[in-house]
Amino acid sequence: MTQHSAGSDQLLETVELEPQGDAAGTVIWLHGLGADGNDFEPIVPMLTLNQPLRFVFPNAPVRPVTINAGMEMRAWYDIDPGSPLSGSDDIAESAAQIQALVEREHSRGMAASQITLAGFSQGGVIALHLGLRCQQRLAGLMALSTYVHNPESLAQEVSFASVDVPIFMAHGVADPMIPIARAVTARETLIGLNYQVEWHEYQMGHQVCPEEIRDLEAWLNRVYP
């Protein structure tokens, strides 16, 4: 695997891992609040994959975050505990920035059906927001320790093209940052809209564990057989 950073005025800066040989698909994987594109890069060498995949890890913009006393950090959207929907505009903007990366993959020869959107925590919110509204069916959606923003409005906004996209959802039963009940609400909302959700829960907090990595590997190998 090789690594490089890419960036321009239009595109988010990314960390990218290229496989040996031609990539059969791309996983665009979004980090959580305060992290960066290097956060999940170390997981890739742990995966034994059937197909050679490109991994793209974008960096979120730096912005003040209300829940952290207005401190500036990498964040896909603001979080204001007193106004749960306050991040909606940021989420839409971040989703558009990830859509630009999806379109760059199209220009590299990847069809939508070869692209998986993945994300942890805040990143998972963006991956689900974009993936469920995408007008072309993606390869899959990977939602780790995350939730659906404003689930009440989801039914009016989802794309019929995405209804059979495979969705991997995983959460820690002791997550102190995003209670598992919030993820269960997201899961039930998706199932209620006829999405096929593969659900996993683990004895962990707001993190990723070795068992989860093995389950992710198996899921990716079903998405890219």
Image (cartoon, grey):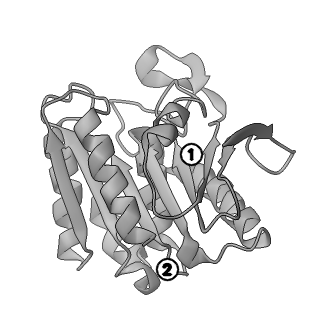
State the separation of the CA atoms marked 1 and 2: 24 Å
Question: What residue do we see at 56% from left, 72% from top?
Answer: 114
Point out the tag, 1 or 2, that comes first from the N-terminus. Answer: 1
Using the rendered image of the protein, determine whether residue 86 is visible from the camera's viewpoint: no
Label drawn at residue 137: 2
Judge whether 203 appears above or below 91 on screen.
above
Residue 208 percent coordinates (x, y): 32, 33
Question: What residue do we see at 22% from left, 63% from top?
Answer: 198
Residue 210 percent coordinates (x, y): 28, 34
Looking at this view, is 162 or 46 the one in front?
Answer: 46
Q: Give the residue number, with chain letter if any, for mark 1.
A: 90
Query: In which quadrant of the rendered view does residue 109 lie?
Result: bottom right
Label drawn at residue 215: none
**Number of numbered discs overlaid on the protein picture:** 2
Categorize mark 1 by other alpha carbons within 10 Å: few (<14), some (14-19), many (20+).
some
Residue 58 percent coordinates (x, y): 64, 42
Location of the C terminus by quadrant is: bottom left
Identify the amino acid type marked 1. Answer: Asp
Judge whether 148 appears above or below 62 on screen.
below
